[in-house]
Image (tube, rainbow, N blue to C red):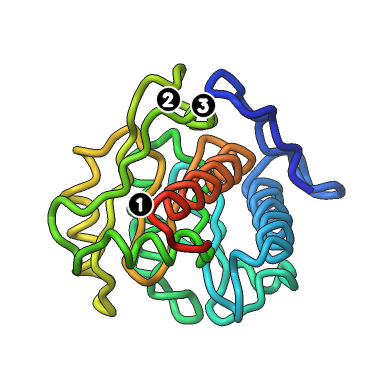
Amino acid sequence: MLNLPQTGGAAVAPPIAPMPGAPGNGAQGAAAAAAASVIDAGQILAARGWVPATSGNLSCRIDADRIAVTASGIDKGSLTPAHILTISLAEPPPKGSSAETALHQLAYRRDPSVNAVLHVHSRSATLISRRIGHGGADDAAVRLRGYELLKAFASVRTHATEIAVPIFANDQDIDALAERVAARLPSFEPTPGFLIEGHGLYAWGRTMAEAHRHLEAFDFLFTCELAQIGVPA
């Protein structure tokens, strides 16, 4: 299971270790370690109810050119190595992968420090994206300010700040959606995630543990925001 760090902006999770029994070096060992990390993440997120009914997709960087990502239509709590695909960051998602894999590829290509990307359909993320999304308006965002838990995000050192989480209109044309995300994300840096309206949340980190910590922080903060506007989460 993931060895999660203590909450706080200064905490840095340990690097992903090779899967027990796998070669410690080389392409095979790196791919096995990344797949094991994705499988562990799937079990944690399924237990929290954040990837219901085979939803969501999870990935981990293997090296500068490749990632390990979940195949389409698989229960994330029951992943095995056979359900994890190794794909190139430079090529379109292959057969068997989710079309949304393109959004994972985007996150890795735009920031070499990103080593894990998690996409979930948590209740809080889905609800707040619908309440605040406004049909994908250019200024749609969840603005989080003044919370001590903001320091769970890697870039934040004080509660006396604000981060904005952009919301994008849902689109079955993933290439078009990826273009809109790529164009708008830079203005929201260093927020480690974004929402798709009525769909869910993408979050990332320098390690799988950090990506999970960011997801947990987003979920708590979204739940607080929903409560303040009278929406039960």
Kind of residue sitting beneath label 1: Phe
Does residue 88 show up?
A: no
Give the number of marks.
3
> In the figure, is residue 130 to the left or right of 27?
left
The image shows residue 53 at horizontal and vertical percentages of 60, 81
Q: Which residue is drawn at 65% across and 46% down?
A: 30
Q: Label for residue 205? A: none
> In the figure, is residue 231 to the left or right of 77?
left
Front residue (pair 85, 129) = 129
Disc 1 vs disc 3: Cβ atoms closer than 8 Å? no
Q: What element carries label 2?
A: loop
Instruction: Please name which of the two marks, 1 or 3, marks the residue nearer to the observer.
Output: 3
Q: Which residue is drawn at 47% across and 53% down?
A: 227
Tell me the crowding category of disc 3: few under 14, some 14 to 19, or many 20 or more residues within 10 angstroms, Cα based.
some
| Residue furthest right in the image | 21
Q: State which quadrant residue 98 falls in.
A: bottom left
> Reading the chain from its start, which is encountered first: label 3 or label 2?
3
Q: What element carries label 1?
A: strand
The image shows residue 213 at horizontal and vertical percentages of 59, 40
Alpha carbon distance from label 3 to label 2: 13 Å
- The residue carrying mark 2 is 155
Kind of residue sitting beneath label 2: Ser
Q: Residue at x 52, y 69 (%)?
A: 56
Location of residue 112 with respect to 224 vertically, above or below: above
> Reading the chain from its start, which is encountered first: label 1 or label 3?
3
- The residue carrying mark 3 is 148
- The residue carrying mark 1 is 194
> In the figure, is residue 84 to the left or right of 2?
left
Q: Residue at x 49, y 60 (%)?
A: 124
